[in-house]
Image (cartoon, rainbow, N blue to C red):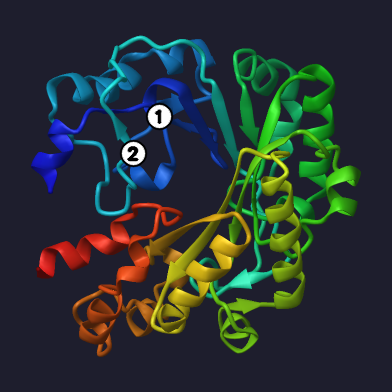
Amino acid sequence: MFEDIKESGCCSFPFSVAEIDWDGNVYGCCAAYFIGYTFGNIFEQSFDEIWNGPKAQEFRRQFLDRNFNHCNFSICPKEFHKDIKPTLIAEYPKRVQLNYDSVCNARCIYCRDHHFKNDVSQFEAHFDDIIVPILKNAELVNVTASGEVFASNYAKNLIQKIGKIYPKLKFYIYTNGILCDEKHLKEFGLWDRVDYYVVSLPAMTKETYDKIVLEGNFENVIKNVKFLGKQKKENKISNLIINYVVTSLNYKEMPMMVDFARENNATVSFVTLNKLENNKNIYDSIAVAEEFHPEHKKYVEFIKNPIFKQPHINKTTTFDIVKETV
């Protein structure tokens, strides 16, 4: 598999995407895909020093010499492209992900074992001198990647401030879908300003949903996904993606999700459960993709179903396990 990666082109993210976490660390991709590696910290250096600094250049060099030491390919979707030419120096990011506001109105059992939020006061104080300049070349921005945008007053204020400074900038939204309706989109200043949505929906029945998403609202999410699907059909947004984290609790509902996504003009990403500090107490009991899980063999046979080869299903690492068993 690794040899295939080495020959498959280049990932665009380290050259065009910046993610900032709750400590101010900067990544050239989703932090989870980096192996304990950051480009630098915005509270210790200027973004200019970070974005094309020694650590950023070292990371990008792996795409030139094909020696990947800093990418976690076990969970990375590996979106490599032949037409991308790697360079050590990159222009300011086209896409910025502000991943430091973790307020959420629900609690998925594989995401967090308790409600928590990060202190955003330092980011708030440095909005003008740090956040605004980082966005100067951006075409897309996400203000809440680790929480729920529509549950956060800080996110609402941030979106409105960014919208005034950069009126042509588009947003992309990660959401649990509970409040993602026309009312909240207009209230947050997002109406007609969202390029695409990623909705987390880990079940297709209320019974299963309620086991996974505590304090959620299954009916609202289904209603709102249908609303977003209509926007996609009318070309008001470029994409609608449903993230479905696969566990022993929900894998048998995956075919239902395939049909639901197709009916609502969405693509679906079946995502393998990632072991986190906040799910370590339940990980072993629900991580059906792990060989030690009692349902693992049944699961492997289940995902061999040809239904998962439909074009609206994103090619994620979830299905690599099938290739390995062939």
The tag earlier along the polypeptide, 1 or 2, is: 1
> In this figure, which residue is indicated by the disc labeled 2?
79
Q: Residue at x 32, y 47 (%)?
A: 76
Q: Position of residue 251 (x, y in %)?
A: 41, 79
For numbered disc 1, what is the local secondary structure?
Answer: helix
In the displayed structure, 5 sits above or below 242; it is: above
Horizontal side of 2 relative to 190 (left or right) equals: left
Q: Position of residue 237 (x, y in %)?
A: 68, 40
Horizontal side of 226 relative to 249 (left or right) equals: right
Q: Position of residue 153 (x, y in %)?
A: 83, 48
Q: 307 or 322, which is in the foreground?
A: 307
In the displayed structure, 211 sits above or below 241; it is: below
Q: Residue at x 32, y 80 (%)?
A: 284
Q: 181 or 214, which is in the foreground?
A: 181
Q: Residue at x 29, y 12 (%)?
A: 87
Badge 2: few (under 14), some or many (20 or more) residues near its Cα, within 10 Å? Answer: some
Asked if labels 2 and 1 touch by Cβ distance under 8 angstroms, the answer is: yes
Q: Quadrant of residue 187?
A: top right
> Residue 271 got which mark?
none
Q: Quadrant of residue 289?
A: bottom left
Question: Three-letter amino acid code at disc 2?
Answer: Glu
Q: 307 or 73, which is in the foreground?
A: 307
Q: Nearer the viewer, mark 1 or mark 2?
A: 2
Distance from disc 1 to disc 2, alpha carbons, whole Å, reads 9 Å
Question: Three-letter amino acid code at disc 1?
Answer: Phe
Quadrant placement of the C terminus: bottom left
> In this figure, which residue is indicated by the disc labeled 1?
13
Q: 89 or 193, which is in the foreground?
A: 193
Asked if residue 266 shows in the view, the reply is yes
Q: Position of residue 115 (x, y in %)?
A: 66, 67
